[in-house]
Amino acid sequence: MSPTPTKNLFGLSLAEIEALVAGLGEPSFRAAQIYSWLYAKRVSSIGAMTNLKAEFRAALSLQCDVRRIDVADRQVSEDGTIKWLFRCDDGATIESVFIPETRRRTICISTQAGCPVKCAFCLTGISGYKRNLKAWEILSQVAHVMDAAPTTSSRDERPWNVVVMGMGEPLLNYEHTMAALRILMDPHGFAITPKKLTLSTVGILPALEKLKLEPVRPNLAISLHAPTSKLRAELMPIENKYALKDVIAAADSYPSPRGGRVTYEYVLLKDVNDRDEHAHALSRLLRGRNGKVNLIPLNPAGPIPFEAPRKAQVARFEGILLDAGIPVSVRKPRGQDVLAACGQLHLKTSRNAS
Ligand code: SAH
Ligand code: SF4
């Protein structure tokens, strides 16, 4: 019996594949071919890599295979949104969401199983933390959703968007998240343009500084959720470590793709952070900065100790920001019939946002 291959090719960088190929005595262009099969063509076996010689495929198969995480469940919403549940090898479960729109298709991915940051209004935070995901587990989500996504025609040309807004805090899992993002943004990999990839973070400052130095960076979304340090600390314990004013200062100098704006996410919680005074304070905080605000009415769920804002108050809040000249959009709930329990995965509709 042949030994079971242990190394998973899926998730490896080009440099890692080059080292492997060199070890097998093959020229380095073979690595580029394998890389393209894995991420541009997304085949699921070494056998399908038909421009590699049969002997090389056989040698490779003795050491390696191509594995993705398993799909555990899939729920389709009335509005076409699909929520995916994946089960990792150790039993950890994570979620991704496919959100179809008229002119684009969005995939929301997770970077950790659970989340250690524990924001008071977030079901993932409330549910606890298990571990960081590996690059291949992060990429698996995108590959699965892309391969299974319903298309509008045989030549569906709606561009893909990826938002790192699922479970977990990506900047607490910097290495694996960036390894996955580099392959996603690589024109020879998944070929998602950086402008169409958004990473959302509470602002883990040392990691944010590293991100700024990456040669290729995604859009940045900062989870703000309060206009003052005092209120933010009540909602997000991380404020005691990385304070709002320092996070905003770091975001001010973030080199966004093609000079775009940083998004400030603001989950609206009834009577807690959604009053006129909060909107005025937020306007003062962000006036003159290169940012835009994304208002997210709370998606309530059983264990979350807050209520969704009133519709009229969401509109007032938005109006106050607009009057102050701050670009703002309100996220429209999507797939609520299947996503309610997830508590965080929504779709953004733009209004006056660049
Ligand atoms: N950890 C990162 C990314 C994942 S959370 C972050 O916090 O930025 C992605 C977004 O979903 C965050 O802005 C988060 O505040 C928001 N969110 C979390 N729980 C929510 C809920 N119950 N309703 C609406 N948005 C929620
Ligand atoms: Fe973690 Fe983001 Fe949820 Fe906060 S909102 S607990 S950082 S996933």
Image (cartoon, grey):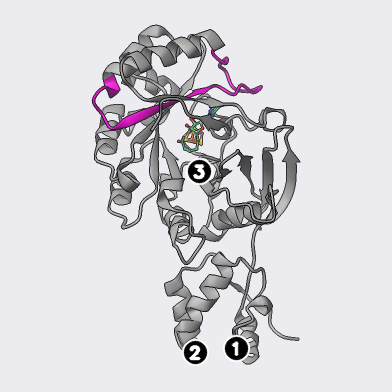
Q: Is residue 297 in view from this perspective?
A: yes
The residue located at (42%, 73%) in the rendering is 15
Which kind of residue does numbered mark 2 sit on?
Glu
Circle 3 packing at 10 Å, graded few (<14), some (14-19), many (20+), is many
**Residue corresponding to mark 2:** 26
**Residue corresponding to mark 3:** 163
The residue located at (52%, 57%) in the rendering is 134
**Residue 75 drawn at (x, y percent):** 74, 40
Q: Secondary structure at mark 2?
A: loop
> From what the image shows, is residue 209 above or below residue 175?
above
Q: Is residue 298 magenta?
A: yes
Q: Nearer the viewer, residue 326 or 73?
A: 326
Relative horizontal placement of residue 39, taking residue 242 as reference (left or right): right
Residue 185's quadrant in the figure? bottom left
The residue located at (47%, 61%) in the rendering is 183
Which kind of residue does numbered mark 3 sit on?
Val
Q: Earlier in the sequence, mark 3 or mark 1?
A: 1
Q: CA distance from mark 2 to mark 1?
A: 8 Å
Residue 263's quadrant in the figure? top left
> From what the image shows, is residue 124 above or below residue 5?
above
Q: What span is colored magenta in the figure?
A: 285-309
